[in-house]
Image: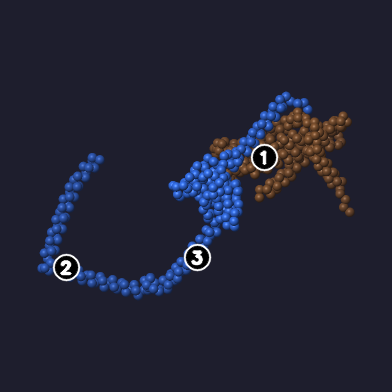
Chain colours: A blue, B brown
Amino acid sequence: MPKEPGYRWKLGLFATITLVLLVIAIFVIGRQKNLFGSVFNISTVFRSVSGLKVGNNVRFGGIDVGTIDDIELMTDTTVRVDMVIQSSVKKFIHRNSVASISSDGLMGDKVIVIAPGQDTTGAQRAPVNGNEILESRAPIETDQIMVSLKTSADNAAIITTQLAELTSRINSGKGALGKLLKDTTLSSNISSTMKNLKKSSEGLNENMEAAKHNFLLRGYFKKKEKEKKKKEEEEQKKEEESSGKTPKDQKKQ
Amino acid sequence: MLTPTPYLKKTFYQTGDQIAFAARFFREVFRPPYQWREIIFQCYLVGYKSLLLIGITGFIMGLVLTIQTRPSMAAFGAESLIPGMVSVSVIREIGPVITALICSGNIGSRMGAELGSMRVTEQIDAMEVSAVNPYHFLVVKRVLATTLMIPLLVVFADSVGLFGSYVAMNIHSRSTLYHFFSQAMGKIDFGDIFPAFVKTFFFGFAIGIIGCFKGYHVSGGTESVGKAANSAVVSASLAVFVIDMLAVQITDLFNR
């Protein structure tokens, strides 16, 4: 086959472009996995990592700053998690920071969240140097949630049985509340009592009228009537004055 | 008594010959003389000449995949996951396989026909007579060229495919190239890219060695050249799928 002119540089161009693309892809991924940037190591210890895997992300302030490098059982109750974190955030992570396990969304991967510690002063406030072991907060397992849910469900069961007893007693007319709602003689008694009360209050009214005409108390009642009349007159005057003013105000506005 | 039919016997003979042919490649590849110019020219034919075809198919591959997945992703409200999903499927599976299939059509058939017509016109016999090793002269450089160039073509197809996906994303929504690629590459891991890259070498080797074998072992008249080209394409495509299946199984074992 006759060789075309310039095949060598064309092949070179093609090979260079594709190799550059490959290298870019590898570096972009490597930067995400912190393979080529400057990083430091830090560890933490959990009782249980609840499904955390090597390669999961580490978050600080909600930002992905690193990945999990290694997960290792140390004793039967402790699991050590080694993390690789970008050096650029080193100065923000203090020695009293707390690591906890959280999940990325409802169904997402597990992540480690590093939160700043409570103590804002003192030697513990100094930034990490690397290779330290951070404090950890135990992750909330679904089992624990289930246990606490169960106790509240048990409590609810007790409350509802008691409530059922109470309502059945009320319905059967037992006790003060039951009497009030169910007993018909009680209501007729109450209505007769009310009638008696009405009668006696009418009698009291008559007595009061009689007392007004008594010579001992007559003076007091007359004084009261006079004061009443005075007040009414003053109020009338005020009303006249204010009604004379208001239309002007409205016009101004 | 059960006797193997002539067809079955022929198939086994062919398989044996094919394996011997492939084994011979590894013996001959390190043996001088190294024909660098010839190898580079074959690389040019395989790599550069397929570039337009691979580019167009790669672009359409990414574009179509994005458009097709959009409705089902939108049903979950997960449209932001499309770049990651497309990049994983293109880089892990679709890019390598589609590229290898197109190359087995394009390159495998050409090699089958080329070597076949050389055999039919007795050029290969003439080489043997004049003390030139025809296998070393004809087969080694071609197989080397496909083995080295198919991976590069796959990288090219993946990149163009992702660009096609970016274009398709912009049909319905607006996103910048940087935003799209950071989303797409965010889902990619070395566990995705490395096995996919390694298997493309095997694809390239299979395409080259099968194409050459079918051409090299042609017997008969001119019509057998066409048969050789045809069976080169069929066998190479089949081999690509078989290698892909094995590669997926092996990757899955290691990822566990």
Q: Is residue A97 above or below residue B165?
A: below
Residue shown at 71% from the left, 25% from the top: A6
* Gap in angstroms between the C-alphas marked 1 and 3: 57 Å
Residue A40 placement (x, y as % from top left)? 56, 43
Residue B88 placement (x, y as % from top left)? 63, 43
Instruction: Indicate the amino acid at tag 2.
Output: Glu
* Gap in angstroms between the C-alphas marked 2 and 3: 67 Å
According to the picture, the residue beneath numbered tag 3 turns out to be A154
According to the picture, the residue beneath numbered tag 2 turns out to be A209
Foreground disc of the pair 1, 2: 1
Instruction: Indicate the amino acid at tag 1.
Output: Gly
Residue B95 is labelled as 1
Instruction: Report the side of B211 relative to A69 (left or right).
Output: right
Q: Chain letter of disc 3?
A: A
Q: Secondary structure under badge 2? A: helix
In the image as oriented, which residue stretches furthest toward the bottom?
A: A185
